[in-house]
Amino acid sequence: MTTIKSIDTRKLVLLALLTAIVIILQILGAFIRFGPFSVSLVLMPIAVGAALLGAFAGAWLGLVFGFVVLISGDANAFMTVSPAATILVVLLKGMLAGFIAGKLYKVFESLNKTLAAIAAAIACPVVNTGVFIIGGYIFFLPTLTEWGVAAGAVNVTAYIFLMLVSLNFIFELGINLILSPAIVRLIQYRQDRFTS
């Protein structure tokens, strides 16, 4: 018979493992670039954690992701413009990506766990990229306009969507859609067998 304490211990261990994976993947992901920014491979364990452990665990994993981005220097281009805005956007986009992925998983879980995992896998990169874009417009529009002109973009919106986020977003969404639901289902299958 499984006790509440052993279930909590397993969840804590899984959260610790996913936290370590987020850190490692973000550090390794800094070497994979499409355009000026690195690809966020960490969205996969964030979506998995949000699905398996809930919205607050997803927010925690997103917060860790944000801290690693800031510490690694991956946001330095924006830090030179506005450190406070950069910190806010980077931490908020990760936290909201994990939190909303967890909430969406919960909404769809009673219908179908695979559908719920897919919803979480989609939400993570959509929210992460969406908050980045909104933050860019709110805090960094003059800088992004300058960068766009220097890159030969027609306008700042074209620059943001076509040059900054398009390839990254497609790659992140694709990886998340392929791997996150499969990992969630495998872990759930293992947990179901372990607790039976």
Image (spheres, grey):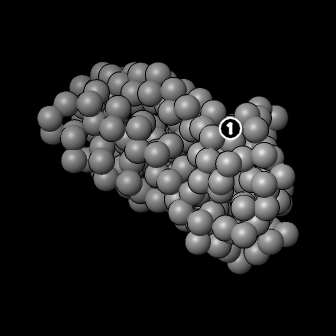
Q: Secondary structure at mark 1?
A: loop
The answer to which of 18 and 43 lies nearer the viewer is 43
Q: In the picture shown, does residue 106 fall above or below 113?
A: below
Name the spot of residue 168 as percent of width and height, x first: 63, 37
Name the spot of residue 61 as percent of width and height, x first: 55, 52
- Determine whether, in the image, residue 55 is placed left or right of residue 139: left
Q: Residue at image x 21%, y 47%?
A: 107
Residue corresponding to mark 1: 39
- Picture quadrant of residue 121: top left
Residue found farthest to the front: 154
Quarter of the figure that contains the C terminus: top left
- Picture quadrant of residue 100: bottom left
Q: Residue at image x 80%, y 68%?
A: 79
Q: Amino acid at mark 1?
A: Val
Q: Residue at image x 71%, y 77%?
A: 84
The answer to which of 55 and 19 lies nearer the viewer is 55
Q: Is residue 149 visible?
A: yes
The answer to which of 112 and 191 lies nearer the viewer is 112
The answer to which of 78 and 7 lies nearer the viewer is 78
Name the spot of residue 113 as percent of width and height, x first: 25, 31
Name the spot of residue 144 as percent of width and height, x first: 72, 60
